Image (tube, helix red, strand yellow):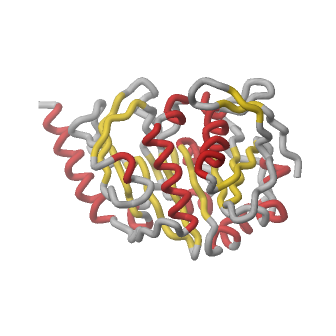
Amino acid sequence: MRFALILTTYLLAFSWLVTPCNAKAESGKTRILMLTQSKGYTHGSVKRNKTELAPAEIAMVQLGKQSGLFTVDCTQDAAADFTKENLKNYDIVIFYTTGMLPIKEADMQYFLNDWLKQKGHGFIGFHSATDTYKTYQPYWDMVGGSFNGHPWNANNTVMITVHNPDHPAMKPFGKEFQFKDEIYQYKNWQPEKVHVLMSLNMEKSNPKRPYQVPVAWAKEWGQGKVFVNNLGHNPQTWTNPAFQKSVIGAIKWIRGDAPAAVPVNPELSKKEDAKAAAATKAATK
């Protein structure tokens, strides 16, 4: 297994400590493979500086140490590390990626149709995970949709409505919150296959669009679980306490420590579509 050995990480209080990103998983801890390879735009949150980990990688390694729940192996070499043989070493896969990754078809099929459907396994997609394999249906069918522009850029502050505040990944946010980050809209969006957890409040966000813009959702995949969160474009997002607690909540949900049902809720999306259309119409009067 050819991981780049990255030795620098830091504490949130601006101090630094040295740790290997590919440390061997300890007994009883969830083992996470975090892929941050870009075959398109490289986001600042996953851009490495020489031997240093990227901000998103640093945050995940730190959260694992602080929570005591998991270990993280970070890689930007999908060809070497996203293989059938190596996936057997992990419980959760995280993607913060872009483009068509150099993953062999057989390895991707194993991931989607075998590995991910196993009990205790899960996929977490952050931000541009939906800007990955946009023309490869088996992947975007699993993820739930694919990137189709970001009218709300990195400097926009948006209002987000949480539809399921009891889900462990949503509890840190409350029922509604403001956030400064880049927000995607989607094509190949399949509300009939997902449980939308939160979306833009179009009445209180600008620019406005006459349709729902989901921000996070979850779904069952066989006996495995999928969690997708659009947030994470800005490096500062990864040091946000609520966001970090949300990540921990998502991992606990996948582990089974914090059970939560995620029935599909397409009726919610229809209602949000109607609200968004009304808000957009009112804004143009």
Tell me where residue 91 sits by quadrant.
bottom right
Quadrant occupied by the C terminus: top left
Hey, which residue is sitting farthest right in the picture?
2
- Residue 180 appears left or right of 40: left
**Residue 174 picture location, percent across and down:** 31, 48
- Residue 264 appears left or right of 145: left
Q: Nearer the viewer, residue 278 or 256?
A: 256
Tell me where residue 99 sits by quadrant.
top right
Q: Nearer the viewer, residue 113 or 75?
A: 75
**Residue 272 picture location, percent across and down:** 26, 53
Residue depicted at 76% across the width and 56% down the height: 25
**Residue 66 picture location, percent across and down:** 60, 45
Residue depicted at 37% across the width and 53% down the height: 171
Does residue 98 appear anywhere in the picture? no
Q: Nearer the viewer, residue 215 or 23?
A: 23
Q: How many marks?
A: 0
Residue depicted at 80% across the width and 48% down the height: 23
Above or below for 121 versus 230: below
Above or below for 192 versus 216: below
Residue depicted at 52% across the width and 49% down the height: 247
**Residue 154 picture location, percent across and down:** 46, 27
